[in-house]
Image (spheres, rainbow, N blue to C red):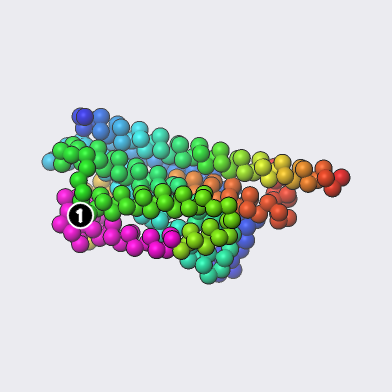
Amino acid sequence: MSHEEVLFVSIALTVIIILLDYFFSYLNTNKREQDVKNQLKEDNEYLD
Amino acid sequence: MLKKLLQIASPPIFFSVASKAYIGFGVLGLLLFILSIAYALISTPIDAQQGLVYKVIYVHVPSAWMSMFLYLIAAIYAIIFWIWRTDVSAVMMRSVLPTGAWMTILTLVTGSLWGKSTWGTYWVWDARLTTELLLLFIYLGLIAVANMIEDEEKTDKALSLMIVFGTFNIPLIYFSVIFWNTLHQGFSLGATSASVSPEIKIALFLCSASFWLICFSIVLLRAKGLLISRQSTANWPSKILGNN
């Protein structure tokens, strides 16, 4: 690989890894919050 | 000061702070990343021996620093967990691990690419490279343990102990270039480093700051998810989620 290609691949990989990490963290957190919301809704319905 | 720190250890306060901080850190970090990479590519000089390829340093070095620093953060939270057994410390200890693993992968891959251009090979069993690879295996092992056992309390105890034991590798990575005769260059910055132009120092500092902000943003985002599912039976999630 040429120097320019090495540099491009390294920066592109950094961006991809950061975005992937964000994406999976967001999905995971969103799912957990949704689960808690659903649980709370079920509990409220049960109490009613 | 201590009172404020103790307040942060309260799950609802931590959740509220993390919910706002992760957005701020994330936006600031991504903007700084774009600006610092642009500055590094345009304004820093080209190395007389290595040419343009040395500019990999602006992603390789910050990711390497973060891979070690995040492990130390996990270790600090592991110790706090052992002393006070708070949910926030357990959650932070777990949240740091995946981002630390990603940073280690990034360090190894960008280092390999840089190595191929300058050393003529993607990999050598050099002390610095081998200890960094060991760090990746430690991270992967800890992530596996964190997700393996159903009982969270038992897992936290085992995990915190394992994280603290794994800390031995961090000084080995950092000082490997002194302890052993390695192919890897010495410290990039610091007392024993060669003189570096101010533009390179500024660019490296800005890139590192952007990595800090981005990594902490991701860690806080992950932590708030883990915390709310852990505390789902407490009173505060209904109040906070009910308002959203």
Residue at far right of view: A48
| Residue underneath mark 1 | B186
Rendered view: B174 above or below B61: below
Using the rendered image of the protein, determine whether residue B207 is visible from the camera's viewpoint: no
Query: What residue is at 52 percent from the left and 62 percent from the top?
Result: B157
Where is residue B53 drawn, in percent x and y?
Answer: 21, 37
Locate the C terminus of chain B and report the quarter of the image it occupies. top right
Where is residue B90 drawn, in percent x and y?
Answer: 54, 58
Using the rendered image of the protein, determine whether residue B74 is visible from the camera's viewpoint: yes
Where is residue A22 drawn, in percent x and y?
Answer: 49, 40
Q: Is residue B180 magenta?
A: yes
Q: Quadrant of residue B44?
A: top left
Query: What residue is at 31 percent from the left and 49 percent from the top?
Result: B133
Q: Which chain is indicated by disc 1?
A: B
Rendered view: B82 above or below A39: below
Query: What residue is at 38 percent from the left and 46 percent from the top?
Result: B103
Toward the viewer: B142 or A28?
A: B142
Locate the N terminus of chain B and report the quarter of the image it occupies. bottom right
SS of the residue under disc 1: loop
Toward the viewer: B192 or B135?
A: B135
Classify mark 1: residues with Cα within 10 Å, few (<14), some (14-19) or many (20+).
some
Q: Is residue B201 left or right of residue B237?
A: left
Q: Amino acid at mark 1?
A: Gly
Q: Is residue B46 magenta?
A: no
Toward the viewer: B201 or B231?
A: B231
Range drawn in magenta: B162-190
Where is residue B89 drawn, in percent x and y?
Answer: 54, 60
Q: Quadrant of residue B116?
A: top left
Toward the viewer: B40 or B170?
A: B170
